[in-house]
């Protein structure tokens, strides 16, 4: 998640170190649903095939989404 431009340098450092957690919108469950729905029929037939996941929101100066898929 992007660091707000108005954030002090001290807080920016703490955000980058994950000492300050991202607890604002968007809700984690909504983000999870968005990405799992987008991958349906591309990565798997249905998102009901997902049996384990680890999700985390964090601040970054290079906001992005990283998805690692492991088949077991």
Image (cartoon, grey):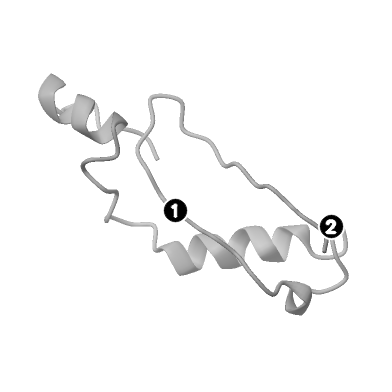
What is the crowding at mark 2: few (fewer than 14 residues within 10 Å), some, or many (at least 20)? few
Whether residue 26 is visible, yes or no, is: yes
Locate residue 43 relative to residue 54 in the image: left or right: right
Relative image position of residue 9 (x, y in whole percent): 14, 20
Identify which residue is drawn at 84% across, 57% down. 43
Locate residue 60, reporting x and y percent: 38, 31
Question: What secondary structure is marked by label 1?
Answer: loop
Q: On the rendered image, what quadrant is the C terminus found in? A: bottom right
Q: How many marks?
A: 2
41 with respect to 3 (left or right): right
Residue at 39%, 57% in the rendered image: 26
Residue density around tag 1, few if under 14, some if 14–19, many if 20 or more, within 10 Å: few
Rendered image: mark on residue 43: 2
Most foreground residue, 4 or 51: 51
- The circle drawn on residue 56 is 1
Q: Is residue 47 left or right of residue 1?
A: right
Label 1, label 2: how far apart the Cα atoms are: 21 Å
Residue sitting at x 72%, y 59%: 38
The quarter of the displayed image where residue 28 is located: bottom left
Q: Is residue 35 left or right of residue 29?
A: right
The reply to whether residue 8 is in sight is no
């Amino acid at each position: 998640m992007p660091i707000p431009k108005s954030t002090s340098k001290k807080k920016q450092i703490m955000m980058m170190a994950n000492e300050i957690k991202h607890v604002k919108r968007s809700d984690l469950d909504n983000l999870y649903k968005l990405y799992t729905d987008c991958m349906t029929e591309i990565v798997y037939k249905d998102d009901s095939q997902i049996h384990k996941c680890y999700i985390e929101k964090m601040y970054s100066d290079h906001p992005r989404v990283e998805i690692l898929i492991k088949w077991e």
